[in-house]
Amino acid sequence: MAQDLLVPGNLILFATILAAVSGVPLLFPCFFSVSRAQLLSIFLMLSASFAGLSGSIVTLFSGRSASYELLWTLPFGQAEFGIDALTAWFLLPIFLIPGCASLYARSYWNADQHLANISKMTFFFGLMTASMSGVVLARDGISFLFVWEIMALSAYFLVSTEDEKSEVSEAGTLYMITTHTGTLGLFALFPLLNLLSGSWLFPASASLSASSWLSTAIFLLALFAFGMKAGIMPLHIWLPSAHANAPSHVSAAMSGVILKVGIYGLIRILSFFHGVPLWWGCCVLVLGVVSGVVGVSFAIGQHDLKRLLAYHSIENIGIIFMGTGVALIGQKVGSPAMMLLGMSGALLHVLNHALFKALLFLGAGSVIHTTGTREIDLMGGVARRLPYTALLFGVGSVAICGLPPLNGFVSELLIFLGLFQGIQGEGGAAVVVTLATPALALLGGLAVACFVKVYGIVFLGVPRSEAHSARHEAGWAMLLPMSILGMLCIVIGLAPGVLISPLQRVTLAILPPLVGVEGHSLPALVPTTMITLAGVFLLTLILLITFWYRRRLLDSVCSQTVTWGCGYQRPAPRMQYSASSFAEMLITLLSFVLKPHSHLSGKIAGIFPGRTRFSSHVPEAVLELVYIPLLKLLYQRFSGIRRLQSGILQQYVLYTLITLVVLLVGSFI
Amino acid sequence: MTNSTIINSTIHIFLALIMPPLLLGVIGKTKAAFAGRVGAPFLQPYYDILRLLHKGTVFSTTTSWVFRAGPIVALATTAVASLLIPFGAHPSPISFDGDMILYAYLFALGRFFTMAAALDTGSSFEGMGSAREATYSCLAEPTLFFALITLSRLSGSYSLTGMLSNVSSGAWLYAGASLLLLIGGMFIVLLVENCRIPFDDPNTHLELTMIHEVMVLDHSGPAFAIIQYAASLKLFVLGAFFVQLALPFATGSPFPDWGIFIVSMLLLAVIIGVVESVMARLRLVRVPQLLVAATILAAFSTLLVIR
């Protein structure tokens, strides 16, 4: 009996419920002290993480799937939830990151110091985790929409945790508007899917033909709705401000996981179709390239640490889209290698990005906690006071740049290999793939530039201002989750072989045309052993040179002095290079997309010019130059319709009634 | 593993260890010849490195472990990259599908730490150098990848050894135009990645105009020796890529082929020396334009083979 209860599916359902109620203790302040209640909810969340992770790992390695039916009396038929390889893969970040983040919150968002919003934050954090798990478990359109909305709304309450600040509530409103625009797309998508497949239940993978106009409409709606949630350019406008204004551990969960739920939706919808036309793949690939290159370009221009990380999420979502696009093109041109490499690269990048982006957001949270600012140009020398945080943030930085020997390199290598497979082909597909490859290389180079800037300016050198110098190392509750994420980045980077068989299983489950194709398996295509050997060899070489260098230093005379300033003997902290200066050359080169604002007060003239001030920043150009003018225009044109919006609740209930009556009458005619 | 593989790998590693500083010596000698001077001996770079190894070290008080890690990581990454690239007609000791990505990203890792070490000193000169390095290397990256795509397409291979061993006089006959464009692009990448004239002057004396040298201003003693050696190794490794493209001569028997490789590398050093003698350093604003031009050259070469 006990064995039956412990099957992976039950574990995952149990974990979902546990996560959903994890915030409840804080809602009853009469029973516990707030601090104890926070501990209890962290305990619940960690148990949920543990149960959910073990359930999904067992599912991934055993290949067993399960499904659960919920009979309810809604007119849409039964609700179905299921666990398969794709679900289990996305459950890994969904349970891992919130678990780490909730432990982190013990120090970062301590109950005693945030009495005003701790219960709201913790409750919705648990609810968001549970609903994300629900989204990937849902197997019919109605329950999908149901949990999708719970997820979107709980994320809204998390973004607006500190809604007494005007910028926070503005970011929340922008998020709310965009997420509901996306949901509107889903409301159209699922009925169309119902029309095509004849059921609200999700069809089996590759069971629908992609040639009809209905499937084209479904594809475009999925691209719009899920692309909005994933933050793909140009639908990313909500993302930078929402990530920047949420508490850091919430940003970690949002960037690490919620965006991935959007990716999940897209991949799930795509998996229903067979015979996809070439333009689907090209469309996804080109969106990925645009998102990647433009996302990282905007990131370079940011002065706000968390906004910068948010733009990097857009970049990484672009990389994931590129992998997906390669797989779709492979499906069209009949290249199993492209399908396997592209899709497994995209899926591995989903996990990898969750790991290093959560690590970076948690690290950024520690830095902001101790310096009291998000402005990169006010920081400096943080590594002296926070050595462990600096080390872990360094691991995350190297990983996000896709550099060996860490995990980002492995997933980018898979996508690169997929692209190189596509180059050998013929016709339009080969040309698109060929032009995408250097773009991936370019965004890798830009990411290196950006993270050298962040790491160098924030952690290295000396503090730039006394008021914002780092004070103390983060507590163990903050360091432990970061160490776990950092270790996983290293493990996946050095031993990607362990993930190859689950990846192969997930890829085969969603791309059934691959089953039975001889001679193409992921282990044969990916040089995992060589990646491990090269990584270990590189680390050994670094260690050997370090030992030799240390002995050399001990044998010779070492002295200390100030930094060489070309003869100037008294360098001051303000003389250090700033983040803005570091990025200036690249911003100028990319100014045709970034449209940077700069402001110079006063004139510089004469031999002794007077005091002047210069400032520059890179705004959210897409929002300011495209959306706001467009929305203003719509606002003017459609002002007549706005009379319907009275803001009186009763009137809206009346609208609902009228709609229902009209529909009812319509169905009888 | 056969005997000949072991012998070839040994020679490969031996050459990578011993030969790189000689290229700097040859470049110096060529420049001296153009200027009508006798110049320093060919082995001067070796003496410089040995002398630095025995010197003491001065550390800036603002620096941390990242500053010390910079040269070490730069050397280790370049050394691993040197094992991935074939020298002449001989296959590289390590070769697998996708090793060209590792090759490109290893340099990026080395650059990451070199630039971070520069920012660690808190000097605005070094920050400036590191910003320039970041910008130029971003622009050089797509050129290298266009080259890899062209070679991969021509050879049907996914590893450096397969791609480069395919380039022969025969390949020049049917894809000559494409390879010619590629050589133009890759020569520019070679010069900018190794901070040579016209992009950067390794011998300049004004910190404001430097790129690579200004990033390593604060390093001294053994660390500076490591940097000098790693820089020459990088020139050697990227040079080997270029030489195999431009001078793909092979006899088929192993030892003459090693001879051809060594002579071609020395010839490359002479060519770089000539370029440095006849050109002046470009203004910094001109550099990105030339890099974009290199990318376009390489893109043309790719389009010629894709069609």
Image: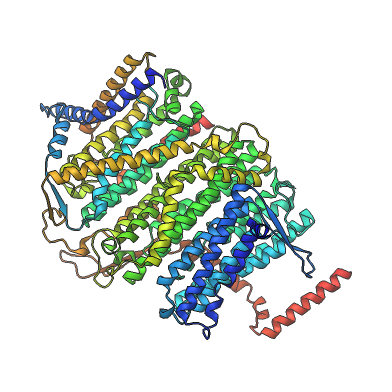
Q: Is residue B218 left or right of residue A324?
A: left
Quadrant that contains the N terminus of chain A: bottom right
Quadrant that contains the C terminus of chain A: bottom right
Indicate whether B81 appears above or below A292.
Answer: above
Indicate whether A219 appears above or below A470.
Answer: above
Q: Position of residue A204 (x, y in %)?
A: 73, 50
Q: Nearer the viewer, residue A63 or A198?
A: A63
**Residue A259 visible in the picture:** no
Residue B161 falls in which quadrant of the image? Answer: top left
Indicate whether A460 appears above or below A440.
Answer: below
Q: Nearer the viewer, residue A364 or B280?
A: A364
> Residue reaching furthest front?
A1
Task: Tell me what residue is drawn at x 78 percent, y 65 percent.
Answer: A76
Q: How is the image coloured?
A: rainbow
Residue B32 falls in which quadrant of the image? Answer: top left
Task: Tell me what residue is drawn at x 79 percent, y 70 percent.
Answer: A73
> Residue reaching furthest right?
A669
Q: Position of residue A45 (x, y in %)?
A: 53, 67
Q: Position of residue A253 (x, y in %)?
A: 50, 64
Q: Is residue B61 left or right of residue A578?
A: left
Q: Nearer the viewer, residue A63 or A429?
A: A63
**Residue A282 visible in the picture:** yes
Residue A375 falls in which quadrant of the image? Answer: bottom left
How many numbered marks, from 0 up? 0
Q: Position of residue A498 (x, y in %)?
A: 51, 44
